């Protein structure tokens, strides 16, 4: 990450968690799409902004960034007027913008809590990227702030809206391949140097906080249970300059109340994206499982292995954007609320602790 960009991000951390006062609209008025403000205009935000064209219930109405050039470039590209472009310093003025119903926080992990709290106190509903925060304590602060403001909080677990993953959840829970006994989930990529993900002050951790959370979250949504025990081993080459402050690889084992065991891998030095649900009568496998696109599913049942054709539906990114808009319009709870992010962070802290102390950690 260039020094100038790092300074811009770090500067945002100092603004504090208690800046804005309550205000703003409770929900999108009937008859128009819900208005989103995107906070942080990095690579993933670019992808999200392009997906509003696929949305039925959502629209992009405001931008927030510490880089004026990005505000101008994306503002012109997506028709966001200058009056709806904000810096981090004047972000709290967003309370006075009735076009903004939802603030989508797409910032380095260490900034999620601050901007979620500020958005809630400005009277806006909040979509926050995963991981929800860098600690259980921050997650609880975010949930409390949104609850106190009477605003909804949703975490950006896009895979819950991807058709292959939705089908895998349904098949596993219905016992399509018998009773689930084992889940294997492996996620990793070869991380390139000089990015905020490799700076613990901004990321809160290494591969586990970034790509490994897909393995963890998949085990929870495929079982419908919360793990009761975890054990983990970390393997990091500290001579690699990428890993001066964060971990590379963590392997972890989760045990669930029903007896299901999940074996997971999180890595910043190997490329893989898959999971397999093994039951008493066969298995269900996705590879790639949680990528932005290209998911494929295979099912082993009755002695035969076949690729499962999944009907195309709304894309996962547009699906999650519209889902939250519908929840706000209808007064319903999102599929993946703040409590879902808190549940993952609770297990992540236990995984780190197990790897550090070299022992099993009980979550019961």
Image (tube, rainbow, N blue to C red):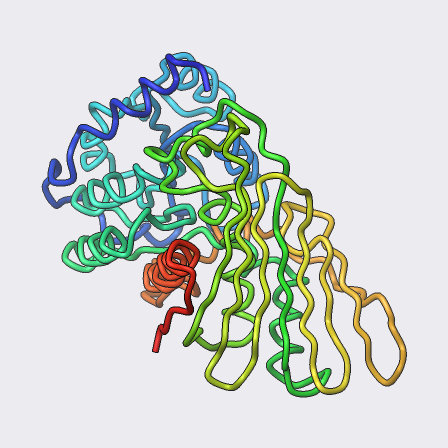
Q: Which residue does the image show at 29% across and 57% down from the upper left?
A: 152
Q: Which residue does the image show at 47% across and 42% down from the upper left?
A: 247
Q: Position of residue 189 (x, y in %)?
A: 63, 40
- Asked whether 10 or 186 is in front, the reply is 186
Q: Is residue 329 visible?
A: no
Quarter where residue 108 is shown: top left
Quarter where residue 41 is shown: top left
Q: Is residue 244 above or below residue 335?
A: above
Q: Position of residue 98 (x, y in %)?
A: 25, 39
- Asked whether 141 or 255 is in front, the reply is 255
Q: Quadrant of the C terminus?
A: bottom left
Q: Across the whole image, how many numbered discs are drawn on residues?
A: 0
Q: Is residue 340 above or below residue 157?
A: below
Q: Is residue 74 above or below residue 231?
A: above
Say whether residue 271 is left or right of residue 69: right
Q: Which residue does the image show at 51% across and 25% down from the upper left?
A: 241
Say whether residue 310 is left or right of residue 181: right
Q: Position of residue 181 (x, y in %)?
A: 63, 81
Q: Position of residue 175 (x, y in %)?
A: 66, 85
Q: Is residue 109 visible?
A: yes
Q: Which residue does the image show at 20% across and 24% down from the upper left?
A: 90
Q: List the single residue furthest toward the right.
A: 304
Quarter where residue 363 is shown: bottom left
Say whether residue 235 is left or right of residue 309: left
- Asked whether 283 or 320 is in front, the reply is 283
């Amino acid at each position: 990450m260039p020094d100038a960009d790092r300074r811009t991000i770090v500067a945002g951390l100092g603004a504090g968690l208690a800046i804005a006062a309550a205000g703003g609209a409770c929900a999108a008025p009937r008859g128009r799409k819900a208005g989103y403000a995107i906070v942080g205009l990095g690579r993933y935000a670019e992808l999200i902004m392009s997906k509003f064209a696929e949305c039925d219930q959502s629209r992009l109405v405001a931008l927030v960034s510490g880089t004026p050039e990005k505000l101008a470039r994306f503002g012109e590209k997506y028709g966001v007027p200058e009056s709806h472009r904000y810096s981090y310093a004047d972000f709290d003025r967003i309370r006075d913008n009735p076009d903004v119903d939802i603030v989508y926080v797409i910032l380095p992990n260490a900034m999620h809590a601050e901007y979620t709290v500020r958005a809630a106190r400005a009277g806006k509903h909040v979509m926050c990227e995963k991981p929800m925060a860098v600690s259980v304590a921050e997650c609880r602060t975010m949930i409390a702030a949104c609850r106190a403001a009477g605003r909804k909080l949703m975490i950006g677990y896009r895979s819950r809206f991807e058709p292959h993953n939705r089908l895998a959840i349904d098949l596993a829970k219905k016992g399509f391949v018998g009773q689930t006994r084992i889940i294997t989930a492996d996620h990793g990529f070869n991380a390139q140097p000089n990015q905020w993900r490799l700076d613990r002050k901004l990321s809160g951790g290494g591969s586990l906080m970034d790509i490994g959370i897909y393995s963890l979250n998949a085990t929870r949504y495929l079982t419908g249970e919360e793990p009761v025990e975890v054990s983990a081993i970390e393997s990091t080459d500290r001579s690699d300059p990428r890993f001066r402050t964060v971990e590379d690889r963590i392997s972890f084992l989760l045990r669930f109340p029903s007896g299901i065991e999940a074996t997971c891998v999180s890595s910043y030095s190997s490329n893989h994206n898959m999971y397999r649900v093994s039951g008493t009568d066969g298995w269900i496998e996705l590879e790639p499982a949680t990528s932005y696109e290209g998911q494929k599913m295979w099912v082993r049942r009755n002695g035969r292995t076949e690729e499962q054709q999944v009907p195309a539906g709304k894309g996962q990114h547009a699906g999650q954007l519209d889902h939250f808009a519908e929840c706000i319009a209808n007064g319903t709870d999102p599929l993946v609320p703040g409590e879902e992010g808190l549940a993952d962070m609770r297990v992540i802290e236990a995984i780190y602790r197990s790897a550090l102390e070299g022992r099993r950690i009980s979550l019961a």
